[in-house]
Image (tube, grey):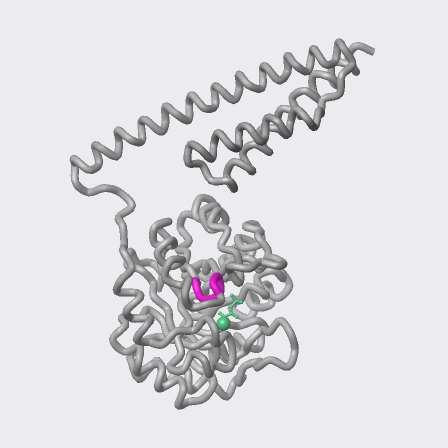
Amino acid sequence: MFNTTDKIIIAGPCSVETEEQMMTIAKGLRAANLTLLRGGIWKPRTRPNSFEGVGELGLPWLKSAGELIGVPVTTEVAKGDHVEMALNAGVDVLWIGARTTVNPFAVQEIADALKGVDIPVMVKNPVNPDVDLWMGAIERLSAVGIKDIAAIHRGFSSYGQKVYRNVPMWELPIELKVRMPEIKIICDPSHICGRRDLLKAVAQKSYDLDMDGLMIETHHLPDEAWSDASQQITPSVFKEMISELIIRKPEAQDLNLSKSLEVLRSQIDQIDHDLIQLLATRMKTAREIGEFKKENDITILQLGRWKEIHDARKALGENLGLSEKFLEVFLNALHKESINQQNEVMNISRSLDK
Ligand code: PEP
Ligand code: MN
């Protein structure tokens, strides 16, 4: 299922609501070239009294909607008995939700229920930003013999977050890609954004980061959806969005293009090399200042001096087009490392003195 170089495209409603709803959505998605039709049967909800899914009763609706358009179907499982019911109903692919991936007992229960079963499984990232936990769930499935596994990046919860429902933190799926290069990563812009207007930009960004596909919630009447109404789009908006996304190549094919890329890359290599050397020189100087402070019994941290450095460097960086966010992170890391280096000079050598 996931062993393909084509983008994996998954669409369908957040929740299966009625048979008619599933059929209507499926018909709308007929020409969309879907890899999978999705529909939530058991819905993990943050607060009680929200719609918690139609349950087992909806499985045949999902299945026949897929059959109607000749597309395999997928649903979320959170417990061993969900697995059993989904398998009995002929669901083609399962996924583990973000609230389940956080819990190794629950993941293990699902894995145990899948022992000896040959079915593709997708694993959403845990709600908290922890790549090990994400990998752990994938490993538990591999350990029971599941071979066809993909990951889904759906963003990470953060308290008081305004723009995104779940912050993308792209560095995490990138880390998963580096640590498990064989695992395809499907981006779920719907749960990252929580709102329609941001979906396309997030989907495009995932393509530009060479992610392997998309899962997007679609509903024929998005505003009336029984769950996640504000992030769902109609099948026709979905089809238009997908057709407008640009798929860029990971490598330049044309020889001239790849030559110019090589030139730019070698410039970057040289700049990085110089940067690291400069940073090492800066830290060497910081250590010399540490020696001086030690001789003269002066504190490492001098707030006034730090503020001066911070503000001046930030203004310089901003004038040169660097973002405020990057400068904050960079300057703080620089300051922290200088303090550590000075601390080492002042305290380790002091303890050696004694
Ligand atoms: C869903 O896909 O509808 C869902 C509940 O997602 P998540 O596990 O990412 O919250
Ligand atoms: Mn949803």
Q: Main secondary structure of the magenta part?
A: helix
Q: Nearer the viewer, residue 163 or 10?
A: 163
- Residue at 66% x, 24% y is 305
Quadrant in the picture for residue 290: top right
Total number of numbered discs in the rendering = 0
Percent across and percent down for residue 138 are 51, 57
- Residue at 71% x, 25% y is 301
Q: Is residue 172 left or right of residue 285?
A: left
The N terminus is located in which quarter?
bottom left
Percent across and percent down for residue 99 are 59, 65
Quadrant in the picture for residue 36: bottom left
Residue 46 higher or lower than 325, as above or below: below
Percent across and percent down for residue 51 are 57, 82
- Residue at 63% x, 58% y is 159
Percent across and percent down for residue 80 are 58, 73
Over which residues does the magenta segment extend?
Answer: 189-193
The C terminus is located in which quarter?
top right
Q: Nearer the viewer, residue 344 or 302?
A: 302
- Residue at 52% x, 36% y is 327
Q: Nearer the viewer, residue 309 or 198?
A: 309
Residue 71 higher or lower than 24, as above or below: above
Q: Nearer the viewer, residue 261 or 221?
A: 221
Q: Is residue 247 left or right of residue 283?
A: left
Residue 223 higher or lower than 6, as above or below: below
| Magenta highlight on residue 191 | yes
| Magenta highlight on residue 147 | no
Residue 152 higher or lower than 77, as above or below: above
Q: Is residue 219 visible?
A: yes
Q: Is residue 143 visible?
A: no
